[in-house]
Amino acid sequence: MANLVTNVQAVAKEHPEEVAVSFRGRETTYEEFWARTGQFAAGLADRGVGEGDRVAVYLPNLPQFVTAFHGTLRAGGVVVPMNPQYKSREIRHLLSDSEAQVVVTLSDLVPFVEEVRDDTDVEHVVTVGEEADAGTDFEAFLGDDHEFEVVDCADDDVAVQPYTSGTTGQPKGVQLTHNNLASNADTAAGLVPDGIRPDDKQLGVLPLFHIYGMTVVMNATLFNGGAYYPLPEWEAQEAVSLIEDERLTLMHGVPAMYNDIINQPDAEEFDLSSLRLAGVGGSGIPIEVLRRFEELYDVKVYEGYGLTETSPVTHFNSPEQGRRVGSIGKSLPGVDAKIVDSDFEERPRVAEGPVDEEEVDLDEITGELVVSGPNVMKGYSGLPEANEEAFTEVDGTRWFHTGDIGYWDEDDFFYVVDREKHMINTAGYNVYPREIEELLFEHEAVADAAVVGIPDDRRGETVKAFVVPVPDADVTPEEIKQFCLDNLAEYKHPREVEFVEELPRTTTGKVQKFELRDRETEAAE
């Protein structure tokens, strides 16, 4: 296989006049887009940046991100995507650890780069937006050679180095190769009925710095000739309007996005009939949110699963394979997966999932989900001990430990119960927050919810629910507690319920439970 970017090159030759990127009314054809990636690659080469060198892209979802990403690959460089919400303290480690020589960023973010620049190898700052006090404007950075020759790369050469979220310790650089990303983008495109086509239009609201938005949305679309419609930030009304006005055909989002849509005041008036596939990942979607979305718009939502370290997708509820609500689906073609115990022995399968968690002892069937395949990362950058912990090799197969707890059934469907680190141990009982969260979403007064374990002198930990009530809801915390007690085993129900205006979330929609736990721990001290 050649450089990952040759997938775009092939489409540009075959469909030069088709739209590659459409942003707020400005359409860029594949021919134009390919030329701009060549100019960006030439701009890097003019400054001595080339094969194996790191280029940090510190931008929201803008056309310049797409150009810089593929232009860097074309030059043989390695893309280091960075969350545009990060400040100087957060980017210092990413820039120094990756040894990035170039940063492409918004003019407004340049001060954060300048503040840490002396601690890094950054030599060039490329700016997007209004003129900045430092750096080179994006257009001025571009070189003249729009036909810049693609630099050859090996399958196992690193193409992208994203960083894990770093909820514990410093974020780790994940080395994803050209083969990792190409294989996963190709497989992800094949999960769409009849594959992604040149007439498809993809909503690009998932952040491009995140592997889900990068591979499943941007690359899978561009590698197959579809049109990519980036949005710089999530706003439910804007996203829905774009789907309606442009008749978009593909949508991927995280659970919080689907929940936001169904909770809009005029949700019943939205027309999403143009969508031929809606995918969800990043974390488990509450079944009630999925049911309500499908009921409103007559669009099936297919749940998938993956991690940054797996490029990202490992499982998907493919339309062709049928769908089991509550399951992450079957493993992708070429990807192996299993549920194992602490001794790496396979856990028994259930006959058919999902199981009734009130009738089954989850501790008897659950274990850690481990995966193996061409999409699994090369390793964490410069962290041999972390790599040793992350992988187990058995009979020549290298298995990656996901850290997620789940079970599987005899039809090869997998079910994730929760993250290992989220599990609550209360008085010797294991409690999985997701089970309680699923129930909370069934209450008509609950718009959003998260469950965590908090310190308890007698039980070690106890269960607390943070609830965002629907506007003008006539409900009390005591009523929510009683609702849970009526539907769950006594040891599982939340001993505390706190109403909040919103939950702390990452830009990809994941609830930052460590913030909730840390706040409670500090309060207890």
Image (cartoon, rainbow, N blue to C red):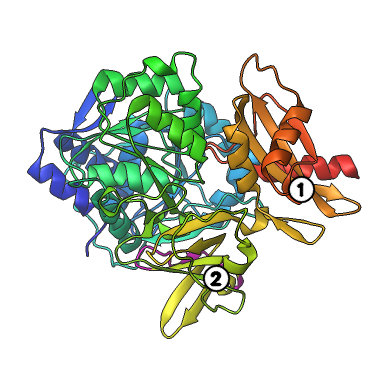
Q: Can residue 225 be seen at all in this image of the molecule?
A: yes
Q: Main secondary structure of the magenta part?
A: loop
Which residue of the protein is positioned furthest toward the left in this rendering? 14
Q: The disc labelled 1 sits on which kind of residue?
A: Glu
Q: Residue at x 59, y 72 (%)?
A: 389
Position of the N terminus by quadrant? bottom left
- Left or right of 268, for residue 499: right
- Left or right of 196, for residue 45: right
- Left or right of 376, for residue 421: right
Residue 482 point in image, percent of width and height: 75, 34
Asked if marks 2 and 1 touch (Cβ < 8 Å), the reply is: no
What range is drawn magenta here?
Answer: 373-385
- The residue labelled by disc 1 is 490
- The residue labelled by disc 2 is 387
Q: Label 2 neighbourhood size at 10 Å, few (<14), some (14-19), many (20+)?
A: some
Residue 90 point in image, percent of width and height: 62, 43
Which of 256 and 27 lies nearest the eye of the viewer? Answer: 256
Real-space CA distance between mark 2 and mark 1, rounded to the nearest whole angstrom: 40 Å
Which of 445 and 395 lies nearest the eye of the viewer? Answer: 445
Residue 52 point in image, percent of width and height: 38, 60
Please say whether residue 377 is one of the residues in the magenta stretch: yes
Which element is circle 2 on? helix
